[in-house]
Image (tube, helix red, strand yellow):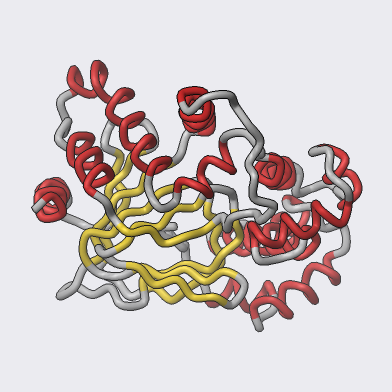
Amino acid sequence: MLKQKIKALVERRLSEDGMFETGIKGVSLFRVTDSIPCAPAVYDPTVIVILSGKKEAILEGDRYVYDNSQYMCCTVSLPVEAGTPDASPEDPLLGVYISLDTKVMTELAIEMESAAGAIKLPKSSEQPPGLSLVNWDDNFADALLRLLQLGDDKTDIAVLGESRLRELYYAVLKGDAGISARRAFGIGNEIARSIEYLSLNLGKNVTIDELASLVGMSRAVFHRKFKQATRMSPIQFMKSMRLNNAAMKIAAGMNVSEAAMAVGYVSSSQFSREFKRMYGQSPKQWSQSKALLENIA
């Protein structure tokens, strides 16, 4: 069975906890044996494959728990809470982290549209969700196995790495997450572009009108489609992204005022109020209670 072969490949390469690069750009393997409660994190466009154990993510109150029966596909940057609450030495979390390269995914999505005929705007007015749990199919499992079979051979990776990663991306675009992925990276990717713009400008006061104008939508249509994709309004999204990024910086050792300024807060009192409202602790309490967090996001 393909899943068992993939698991065996990963197990042979991981003898201790942590995130380990494979040599293929954007592809890492991870192992976790500690129970880590869900904590603020930011998911970038990513596929996360679980081979044993369970992983958990929370987006706007909705809990996503996934194991080796489904992989997680995130097509846009999202502020979440993530953790490994069930991991233990007896039941370690093993998996593969695959960053989705925007340029390559866009090329593939447009190529798929071209191969199907004239490139057309998506018919559906509904914006697919940016985070989904996806059933494995044979194409995805086969592409992942072929990718990981490159192992540590530098020559194989140099010659075949990009093409096999491209093959995996193609399997994602053809699979159950395909509609969301093609909307995020291909034609009709206005919401994904606005999220990328917001994520790159956390320190600025970006307005909804500015975002709607940026992608050529009315304010009302933009607001509706943004919420369909992210489960939150643009203002909620910006606040969550800022606070999650600040929480991660504080957990990693940055002092509270620097973290607040880094994500665009001018008023430290406003930052503290919003932080406590979001997480139930003041930034100072958070910094005292959290050691360095290395979430397998």
| Image quadrant containing the C terminus | bottom left
> Taking 195 as reference, is 231 above or below it?
below
Q: Is residue 104 visible?
A: no
Q: Please name whichever residue, 71 or 118, is drawn nearer the observer in this view of the structure.
A: 118
Residue 219, given in percent of the width and then of the height, sits at 88, 52
- Most distant residue in the front direction: 117
Q: Is residue 263 visible?
A: yes
The residue at the point 30 percent across, 70 percent down is: 54
Residue 199, given in percent of the width and then of the height, sits at 68, 46
Classify residue 100 by image quadrant.
top left
Classify residue 55 by image quadrant.
bottom left
> Taking 275 as reference, is 194 above or below it?
above
Residue 254, given in percent of the width and then of the height, sits at 62, 57
Q: How many marks?
A: 0
Classify residue 294 by image quadrant.
bottom left
Say left or right for 69 vs 284. left
The residue at the point 87 percent across, 52 percent down is: 208
Q: Please name whichever residue, 60 or 27, is drawn nearer the observer in this view of the structure.
A: 60
Say left or right for 33 vs 56. left
Say left or right for 117 vs 36. right
Say left or right for 230 vs 163. right
> Taking 257 as reference, is 149 above or below it?
above
The residue at the point 46 percent across, 63 percent down is: 293
The residue at the point 40 percent across, 49 percent down is: 47
- Most distant residue in the bottom direction: 280
